Amino acid sequence: MIPTDFSYWRPETAEEAVAVHQQLADDGQHPVYYAGGTEVVTRTRLGQLTPGAVIDVKAIPEARRLGRDGGRWHVGAALSLADLIHDGSWPLLARVAERVADHTTRSHITLGGNLAGTIAYREAALPFWLADADVATVGPHGRRTARFHDRFDGTLALDPGELVVSLSVPDGVRQQPSYAQKATRLDYVDYPLVTIAALRGAEGQVHVALSGLKPEPFRSAALDAALIGSGSSADRAERAARHLPVTLVQDLHGTGDYRRFVAQTVLADALTALEGH
Amino acid sequence: MHAVGQSVARKEAPNKVTGRARYNGDATPVGTLTAVIVPSRHAHARLRQVDVAPARRMPGVVAVLTGQDADLLCGEVLEDRPPLARGTVRYHGEPVALVIAHGEAEARAAARRVAIDCAPLPLVASVEAAVAPDAPLIHPELGAYKRAQPPVVPKPRTNIADHAKIRRGDPAEGWAASDVTVSGHYTVPQVDHAAMETRSARVEILHDGRVIVQSTTQAPFEVQKLLAQSFHLQQGQVIVDVPLVGGAFGGKAAVQLEVLAYLASRAVNGRPVQLVNSREEDMATSPVGMGLVADVKLGATRDGLLQVAELTFLLDTGAYTDSTPRVARAICSECTGPYRVENVRCDAYTVYTNHTYATAFRGFGHFPLTFAIERTMDRLAATLGMDPVELRRKNLIGPGDRTPTRMMLTRSTLGDPRTCLDRAAALLAGPPVQPTGPHTVRARGLALFWKTSSSPPNAISGALVSFNQDGSVNLSTGTVEVGAGTKTTSAQILAEQLGIDVDQVHIHTHINTKVDPEHWKTVASMSTFMAGRAVMEAAEDAKAQLKSVAAIALKCAPGDLSVGQGRVFLTADPNVSVTVSDVAHGYSYPGGDAVGGQIIGRGSYIMRHLTLLDEETGEGHPGPSFTVGAQGVEIDLDTRTWQYRVVRALTVVDAGRAINPAGARAMLQGGMCMGIGLATREGVLYDRDGQRLNNQLRTYKVMRAGEQPDAYVVELVETPQIDAPFGARALGEHGLLAMPAAVAAAVSHAIGRPVDHLPITPESLWQLSRSAEAAR
Amino acid sequence: MQSTNTGRAEHLLTVNGEQRRVSLRPADTLLSTLRDELGLTGAKPGCENGDCGACTVLVDGVPMKSCLLLTTEFVDQDPPRSVETVEGLDGADVQRQFLQHWAFQCGYCTSGFLMLVEGLRRQQPEANRDERVDWLRSNICRCTSYAELIHAVEAVLGHERGAPRSS
């Protein structure tokens, strides 16, 4: 039961979406883009969000694209996590996605919603953050394709009214060795203490991105650098863990200290899995 | 043809797999108004002003109530709780105002406009803080509260709402006789019932004076009584109707929303008003299960014979007492666990905190109690260097022994704990811990439980049996179908007694206090026993009437006749008979003239020989019998990550007699699963300001598929309880009782350190290992 | 561009193969429409937060949590979107197996689990044990031990064939 009222809009192009967003915003309607609904519906029910209008982006064809084009693999932001898992052609993305929420809810949650929503874990961003990804958006200032890296530092930097349409990665990235793991307090279906995505580069070095440690996803060049070198996975994980943020999230799922311990464990697991030792 | 002992499917089962089973929120008449609670955002504060004017102006709003509109105090044992806060709020989520509107959307939108101005008061965040000297008082008026259902012993000018005791034997003597003493300190958090159906109530006050209440309650007759008392009504004016209930676990035995819905209806000229908890409200505003802090000290001889037990329990009842003083006495009654201890000193304090208030939770205090006792028994075994099973066997209580309340036990009242223990130990054979990989171990743990009903000594139940013209039978009892299959069990008992097929018995799935005979409450696993006894008596009554009419028809004495398979027949010559349908509504002679009349079988049961516990010594008779059992688990634990999983769980319980074996197993297994959840993940959490942190199923974690053990083993021992229907003992709560203790035992073995706090999360084990390392 | 203004209006919704006229606000969830407008109360409001799955229905054959969906997404579509609720199951095998295996007690989560398992049967009948469990994790049952539900699924899908998926 959503106690407040809003109008509902279903544009068929991204430009149309942005235009209606702008118009509704100008009218003081506080519009929100709407895809899977897992955040908009629940937060509106609880009064944490009071949109005057929701703009459903699922009817925009390019936000549902999936496939190769020009040496890159493109994935629409309005595809559900279940779609990405079913496709399975980027194992790292599929493995990260299949630990978000639960099986049914993954048919609701979209890639774009997971990247740009309020729930801060944004696990689906991790693979893109590690790959040489691009993000295509349409905003009040028009279309823009940028390096994901340049627009994402744990939070996707979007202008008001700017809509994520799709992402792409170099086609070959999908075949690079990768590893993903989610560690929770105990339950399989729960928010992560730590989710790790790791990608092994052409030269063998491992890059990692982590969710759950800070209020938003985290990665660090210094941490990646500390993963290189001699020593066992456990030793290098311990060295690398020194580059984790000084203060980690402390909440009902776990303390900061415990998260640090768990992060070190999953770092070691990632190295072992990707290097075999 | 036997109906008892058969795994008959639930009568209402076909409706439950077609979406046609009706629960309280499923059939709301058009025109029903919606009431929504405005909860307190503070855990402890003085209310300065509640400004409802902006809410009243919202569209669709009919009325807004505050504590000013409700000058009464509620409480099952001690009347300490205003239905809407007055002057003070005492927990985060406490109802402060009630918004009544045409629809839920309007009511919820308006509820957000109620402005609550309050001044924070010092927070009492734990039972330890609550009993500290100079603790802020949560109820300065404690001494003035009315004691609705003694015994209850409040300590005015403290946060102790009740002090229950056991004083048995001479502890000093026990300590003197002891070679070894062990002690332990244990904590169990408050837990949430998390029934899948949230609590709800609908009230309409008719102009002929009738008050129609539709509710999810486990205690319709209690709702009826309380509303009549609180609002000065004749009890018969209040009609409580309860459809199927979507899980209860004790949480629906508390009367809360019914009072609010009554106030709401009264404020709108008696129009029907319904109040349905959101999940968030169900978790933070409606009562939870109590938390427990326990200190247990045991003394034993060198060869392991228990000499003395001293126990102190602090029960976290949160802001109000509800039934916790009764839980405290239930804990006292069985405070030693199923062991023979002559010298016992037990103090159970019901302690106020600024937490959500507590009510009954499946097991009525016995899973926390069992956790504390069984952990201490394991400590004693370790100290003595004795096998924990052997220690338990040596001290096991038996017929001829007395319980802490000095109740003398018989084989019938106790059952056979020894066989339960021996079978469970055999099923759990293997070393306490064994390595299964470089950093993985498998470990085992076992624990015992016992429990009696701790019901009021005058608890009653009734049954009515009537016949249809075709000879099929209608059965009416006062129990609520919460999922335990109690209605079907009653039907089986009736079918057995009348010698008919259970399909020939038609039950009322709804309870209506106006037409159904009173049953105390559908709690304490007592439905089979109490309603079953009433059903048996009703069957006998109906049979006697059938025989007396048939005797006329068959020209014999009633004593010559038997009833079965739809016929009343000469015992000596079954060929001489009439059908039940020939006599159940009067017997007609060939000429058309008739004798007899409609046959209505009535049966009732009242608890017998139960007594309240003495305020000083605890002496008394708390229940008709015990259910005893042993439970065990095997766990796989990773000593690198501290993650673990229960892979096998077993229960051996003295069921007396399983009236519905598959139903009994399902009930026990479900309890085991819940018990594993309580052991491993469940617990109500508050932040430092007393705000409830986990008021959703996303954050209050319960078991999901895949987290259950790979194997459940359930074995039933059958030592009949002589006075119970077909010997059947209570089983509804028992599957969970010793699971947390068994899991803790296994984890303790796995990590080589005692685990004394619930829930046992991987982080808690990591913290334990760290503190052990730091101490090294 | 399709749009629906704030406020109540009538629309067509296809439920269990029947076209139904419903009055709704754009903010109405599919769960509230099913229950309050159509009287299809099999789907239950266990949490209205997507956590418990008691409201699960099939949308175009796929299990979805109706508390997280806006009805307006599914109305007036050509071809119509298909919404199936427990009331649309008619003597389905999954219902028989739930009865047979004591896969419920209080029954409140049952409609959601039935639709989940029916969705599993249609979408992934060859699912291995891990995959079956992963589907079942979407919903909560507070009464049973889950073993009963898993046995019911085994009976519906047949015992697992082939090795668990490696990943």
Image (cartoon, coloured by chain):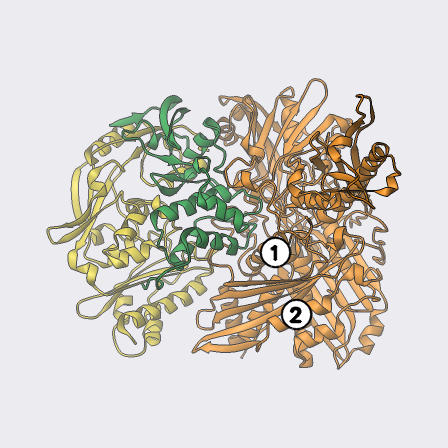
Chain colours: A yellow, B orange, C green
- Any mark on residue B423, and which? 2
Q: Is residue B639 above or below residue B258?
A: below
Q: Quadrant of residue B494?
A: top right
- Any mark on residue B60, and which? none
Looking at the picture, how far across and down is residue A119, in whole percent?
Answer: 38, 47
Q: Quadrant of residue B348?
A: bottom right
Label 2, label 1: how many angstroms apart (C-alpha)?
A: 17 Å
The chain containing the residue under callout 2 comes to: B
Q: Quadrant of residue B432?
A: bottom right
- Any mark on residue B665, and which? 1
Give neighbour class at mark 1: few <14, some 14-19, many 20+ (Cα, 10 Å): many
Looking at the picture, how far across and down is residue B680, in whole percent?
Answer: 54, 61
In the structure shown, which secondary structural element does the residue marked by tag 2 occupy?
helix
Is residue B35 among the parts visible in the rendering? yes
In the structure shown, which secondary structural element does the residue marked by tag 1 occupy?
helix
The chain containing the residue under callout 1 comes to: B
Q: From the viewer's perspective, is B402 left or right of A19?
A: right
Looking at the picture, how far across and down is residue B237, in whole percent?
Answer: 74, 25
Is residue A48 among the parts visible in the rendering? no
Give whichever of A251, B515 is nearer the camera.
B515
Q: Is residue B460 above or below residue B677?
A: above
Residue at the extreme right of the image, as rendered: B557
Q: Earlier in the sequence, mark 2 or mark 1?
A: 2
Q: From the viewer's perspective, is B111 left or right of B640?
A: right
The residue lying at 34 percent from left, 69 percent from top is: A269
